[in-house]
Image (spheres, rainbow, N blue to C red):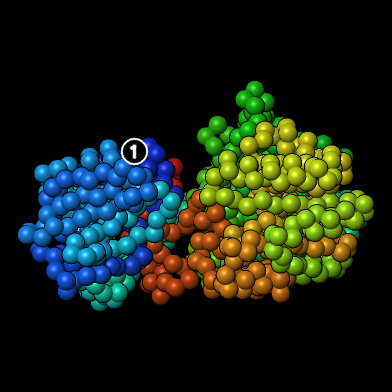
Amino acid sequence: MLDNITKSNLFNSIENIKGIGPKTSKLFEKLCGTKIIDLLLTMPRGIKKRMFLDQVSEQFLKEEVALIITVVKHIPQFNPRMPYKILCKNKNNEIEIIFFRGYTKYLKKILPVGENKVVCGKLEKLGSKYQIIHPESISHLEELPYLHGSLSLYSLTKGLTMSLYRKSIFSALKELIEIPEWINEAIIKKNNWHTWKETIELLHNPKELNDEKINKFKDRLSFDEALSHYIKLLIMKDKMKKNICYAVNVNNEIKNKILSDINFKLTGSQLKVLNEIENDLNKKTPMLRLLQGDVGSGKTIIALISLANLINRKMQGALMVPTEILAIQHYNYFSNMLKETNVKIALLTSKIKKKERDDIYENIENGSIQIIIGTHALFQKNVNFNNLNYIVIDEQHRFGVHQKFQLSEKGSNPHVLVMTATPIPRTLALTMYGNMNISKITELPANRTKIETRTISSNKTNKIIEELKSIIEKKENVFWICPLIEESEKLDLTAATKRFEKLKKYFGNYVGIIHGKMDIEEKKKIIDKFKSKKILILVSTTIIEVGIDVPNATVIIIEEANRFGLSQLHQLRGRVGRSDKKSSCILLYKNKNINEFSKKRLNTIKLNNDGFKIAEEDLKLRGFGEISGTKQSGYQLFKILDPLKDIKIMEEALVEAKKIFEKRKNMKKEDKNIINIFLKIYNQSSSMDYIKIA
Ligand code: ADP
Ligand code: MG
């Protein structure tokens, strides 16, 4: 049985499916993932009814139908503005299939004269002729059973049609195999659930239209997913706490030095969380702590002070951040603040040149570098730490649970602090990360003034540019953010470049541009120039979204603000208002793109300055994946489960996971394998194959 699974195609690339080539697979990837199993685990967003008509008749006009037709002849258009018609027969009736923009070659290929096909679409009649205009699909006869009755609908992306999606699902369904049940029988019975295989089959091919059933299928798969998630957490936690760790005793001398070097006093909140962290670090059991604090609340200094405890000990610390720009910024800040100590700090990102990178690897391995600041590059294979004792992860919502774990694995039970400005309700944090302790910074530094936020039509962009003149005279910095367009970095860049050129006409060399495609040296240079006020207006794509700290920046302009999530807008806005200077945020929108709903969203930002409030609104308006940033980062925590709605399922799954986990040592090998297969099915990261029950 299990042999079947290892041999099955489920874990192979979706490119193995007929009709999905390298190009289309990229589109699918955006929606579901890279493997056949990922495709099968996409949830239909609804159902549509379509009837099979043996014979067309008046009574079914305007209905969605599936028909068997025989192609009689093609009537090409001589004038490109005329429709392309294909005359067909259905029983004794004539029916025309009409395309307004048709490519003769293509149409002849999909509807060859003399062949029988299934055509689906809305039945129309013009004069005495039946018609189907732009059929939704044209298929082989053997696909007929999938083409009528209740049909699942899927979320699509540009370039992907519903019929291709459905067809691919059908092909993928052929690869589906039965896996022995892993959920407790009593739970299956109580909920009246089907087997795993049946559930997926029914989900994509519902025999009768019925939301209740869809929910039932979804619940079963959500339970699977939650169960696998919790078992994984338990495995990780078990690995982490197995050995005791080194205590990182607090170094008061360095701490006091830092505190006297900064030109502000820590807030009461900052002192409190620092204390909580220090207490943990002093212990010989590894810390696992989440530090929440709104944008600008001053989390970096906490990371700095706590990491500085490692100095003059044979210990290493790592600070991991989601973007290169943020890594550079933290690196500069740390280097500057600790320059009078003998600590060695390194910057490690994937864009650092090979030779330099090899040097860094070597010095990480021999222990001469003590604090390593970097991006995802930190947990790659070649990085071997000498003695990694303490890890700080900034903007944690940008990383997956696994990635955090992968980094921890590089030390022997290091202390872990994860920091975030995106608030996650406590219950959710617990269900997502297990027994994590939480610290909160609940106040902003006293010197802050409220950021004035305005929503303005992009027709008035020129007026905004005029307004910037006085800001430039004052030598204050401005961010100008251009949005993600169709999630393509290339198009993004065009928009940003255009804006850059235009602003240059007004402000000359005061304008700079920064984007993801630049190499690290270029980025460093631009940021330096911005901080030293040689550049005053920085045009950027959203790569500066998180963490960037330029206290002299007082204005941020966000183009097509309605394209962003609320939490993302709040993060962006947080780039200004980082000092006592009066700051403002301008949200531009295009009139044609804005409706009541998007107005309401922008207003939420305008009226609220509190990240927690905004996050709550965001949760109401959008899904969890989007608010937690996991969607934007291309990393989705769950495929099916909605941690906001499926709380009951999660609770029950947690209980079950614990039971399974406790029993694991006495399990038969066969049973362990079944569990490991489910872990793999719901695995959120392909590189994590090693999370298994052993
Ligand atoms: P975030 O929590 O968003 O990461 P940062 O750590 O980047 O915030 O801090 C934002 C800015 O506020 C930085 O310029 C930092 O030096 C400054 N800052 C931090 N703590 C205080 C404080 N207690 N008083 C005044 N300014 C502070
Ligand atoms: Mg920060």
The residue that appears at 58% across and 53% down in the rendered structure is 398
398 displayed left or right of 496: left
- Is residue 201 positioned above or below 167 on the image? below
The residue that appears at 47% across and 55% down in the rendered structure is 636
Q: Position of residue 209 (x, y in %)?
A: 24, 72
Q: Position of residue 220 (x, y in %)?
A: 30, 67
16 displayed left or right of 410: left
Amino acid type shown at disc 1: Gly
Q: Nearer the viewer, residue 38 or 223?
A: 38
Any part of residue 519 in sight: yes
Q: Position of residue 105 (x, y in %)?
A: 27, 37
Crowdedness near tag 1: few (<14), some (14–19) or many (≥20) residues, C-alpha within 10 Å:
few
Q: Nearer the viewer, residue 453 or 89?
A: 89
- Within 8 Å of ligand 2, the CB of disc 1? no
The residue that appears at 69% across and 34% down in the rendered structure is 520
617 displayed left or right of 554: left
- Is residue 87 positioned above or below 621 on the image? above
Any part of residue 444 in sight: no
Q: Where does label 1 land, which residue?
A: 21
Q: Nearer the viewer, residue 379 or 171?
A: 171
